[in-house]
Image (cartoon, coloured by chain):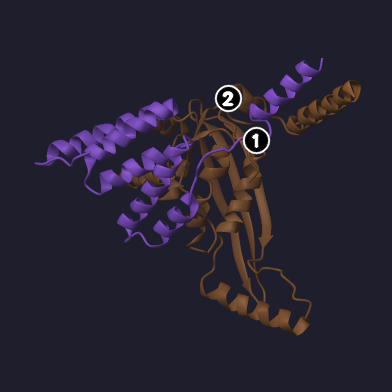
Amino acid sequence: MIRVLLLGTILMVTSGCAVQRGYAWGSYEQNLYDHYRDPSKASEFSEKMFRDLTDAEASKRVPPGVYAEYGYLMLEAGKPRKAAYYFNKEKTLWPESSRFMDTLTQAAIKANSGQKTGDTQ
Amino acid sequence: MKRLLTAGLVITTITTLTACVAAPPARDYSAFNKAAPRSILVLPVVNKSLDVEAPSYFLSTVTTPFANRGFYIFPVNAVKSVMDLEGMADPDLAHRADPKILGELFGADAILYVTINRWDAKYALITTSVTVDFGYEIKDGRTGESLWKDKQMMVYSPQQNNSTGNPMADLLVMAVSAAITKAKPNYLPLTRIANGSVSLRVPEGPYIQKVMN
């Protein structure tokens, strides 16, 4: 009896009812707002996004949309191969993003073929 | 001793169980539940207020609560940029577009429409308060049907209410903080609170994150 109850309690607690850590958002909201407020600092924004993304990957709690946001910033920065790499990561982690990521990947491939020397991974 | 331990565990189990039960929904969610969307596309915000910064505050804080609620939220910044390129930079235009076409374009199960109806900052001598009124609607990205509608009205004061116990000192602190707030207002907490409470009135999505924010 005790063993069953103990097991049940442990299971419930560990299964995440009470303790689940959720997504690793980092400073996503503040970074995005700063970017809207001053769009001229695009490289600063992508550096902050990359730092948060690295932390999120380390904790395996990457939130939806973050790979895609970073990939899009890479596309805008003229790094289509890097962009495509992150679009694919988004698609793998979140199948819901498939159609949008396919569209963005097409755009990245097109941008890459337009460049004489592609960026490196 | 063994009996006591058993009783204790029974109580712990019951408490753990009850803590997990969500409050029963008071509204009709049948259309939403039938559609059971997994993903939500957030459209650019229609701003009916005079505050030009309001949409930026809003868009920056909409992803986190709705993603925590369990939905795949399309990357708002990438979506905004793509819509700009597609000639839908004007939020009114995007809101008037056929939801089915937008749903098809992005592969989105559902679309979130937000209108900032009111964003009034009242700058008094010492305190500043902002009254906001946001309208939210989620439409089905496949049928265009309205699945859920809500409103969020609130009054927000950026000042901190930390009393020192000395009325004169309090007044000084408030005056200083009001001056700072006027110089560089930060309304991220406002939209964070608004979006956070609204997201909890949407049925849970498949990736629900049980965390206390």
* Residue B6, horizontal then vertical, whole percent: 86, 22
The chain letter of the purple chain reads: A
Q: State which chain disc 2 sits on.
A: B
Q: In which quarter of the image is the N terminus of chain B?
A: top right
Q: Marks 1/2: CA distance?
A: 26 Å
Q: State which chain disc 1 sits on.
A: A
Which residue is situated farthest in the left direction here?
Answer: A116
Task: Confirm whether residue B147 shows in the render.
Answer: yes
The tag on residue B36 is 2
The chain letter of the brown chain reads: B
Residue B166 against residue A59 in the figure, above or below: below
Q: Is mark 1 on a helix, strand or loop?
A: loop
Q: In the image, what residue type sits under mark 2?
A: Ala
Q: What element carries label 2?
A: loop
Q: In the image, what residue type sits under mark 1?
A: Val
A114 lies left or right of B94: left
Task: Confirm whether residue B25 shows in the render.
Answer: no
**Residue occupied by mark 1:** A19
Residue B74 against residue B61 in the figure, above or below: above
Count neighbours of disc 1 (C-alpha within 10 A) and say few if under 14, some if 14 to 19, many if 20 or more.
few
